[in-house]
Image: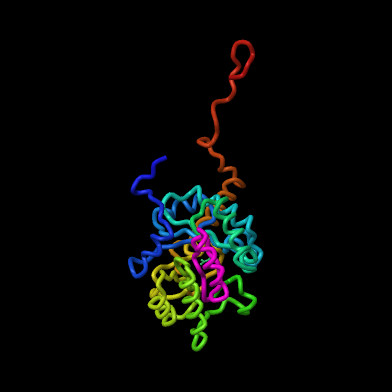
Amino acid sequence: MSISAETKAITPPDIRLRKGQAPLVCLTAYTTPVARFIDPHCDVVLVGDSVGMVLHGLPSTLGVTLDMMILHGKAVRRGLKRALMVVDMPFGSYEEGPGQAFRNAARVMAETGCAAIKIEGGEAMAQTIHFLAARGVPVMAHVGLTPQAVNTFGGYRVQGRGEDGERIRRDAQAVAQAGAFSVVLEKVPEPLARWITEEVAVPTIGIGASPACDGQILVVDDMLGLFGDFRPKFVKRYAALGQIAEAAVAAYAQDVRERHFPAAEHVFGDAPKTVKGGEAA
Ligand code: KIV
């Protein structure tokens, strides 16, 4: 199948070249239909391990497995033509060392068809990022608040306030120098996000990290108002689809109870006729 100019897929080097250019538009997706409608508008679609909390009702991302990421990755792949697809490596699938990370990342890439993976962690992951990047695995890094380390942080707090900013700065530098093609900065204060964006050679993609970043990412269910009452400061709600869906379900329930649904237009055919030979038409 030939790919037309409009549908040429965005690659990790394309994203790398967007440093300091027009802001990168990134969203998460976990299913084919959502991937389909966000694809024309996004540069990057991340199959985030947030899927565990958003779609599976888990209390954190720690219970997400490689099989879950692969299942959702395959679904998202079927919905994308243009955006770069990145799949999150779940907790426990890469931290042991470069060998484990490569084995699991290669499986994710081969089975989902994604062109890149994302891993959480800064300096401690630099060697692994270098190993992967040198062996055909493009890596998006993730520093600042890294949700897989929620127990170490003691909650989902803003990271890098005051002197702690130095730690996040070193993390961002280390992953960029190790060969990550971009770095997600999560929940860090504005001046720190600005410094890091000015300092590192690869695009920064912010989530709760101010407009100073080279791009922005949100969890799609959060910005569509589909994920309950979860409303952190950094999320802008562009729709209230959860409320719309609930009102629709309530209207359906009432229609069924009052026998208004199905109406004549939802019912098939005429009453059965008897034809010669006794068979019903
Ligand atoms: O899992 C996720 O959705 C993420 C984000 C950066 C949004 O890692």
Farthest top residue in view: 277
As drawn, is 203 to the left or to the right of 98?
left
* Frontmost residue, 144 versus 121: 121
* Residue 243 in sight: no
* Residue 182 in sight: yes
**Residue 51 lies in what quarter of the image?**
bottom right
Magenta-drawn stretch contains 271? no
Q: Residue at x 63, y 79 (%)?
A: 154
On the image, the x and y values in percent for residue 13 come to 41, 60
29 versus 204 height, above or below: above
274 versus 130 height, above or below: above
Q: Residue at x 47, y 70 (%)?
A: 183
Farthest bottom residue in view: 163
On the image, the x and y values in percent for residue 191 come to 41, 82
On the image, the x and y values in percent for residue 195 come to 40, 80
Specify the quadrant that holds the C terminus.
Answer: top right
On the image, the x and y values in percent for residue 227 come to 55, 63
Render colour scheme: rainbow
* Frontmost residue, 209 versus 10: 10
Magenta-drawn stretch contains 133? yes
- So how many labels did they put on this image? 0
Q: Residue at x 64, y 13 (%)?
A: 278
Specify the quadrant that holds the N terminus.
Answer: top left
Q: Residue at x 61, y 79 (%)?
A: 153
As drawn, is 238 to the left or to the right of 53?
left
Residue range in magenta is 117-144
* Frontmost residue, 70 versus 14: 14
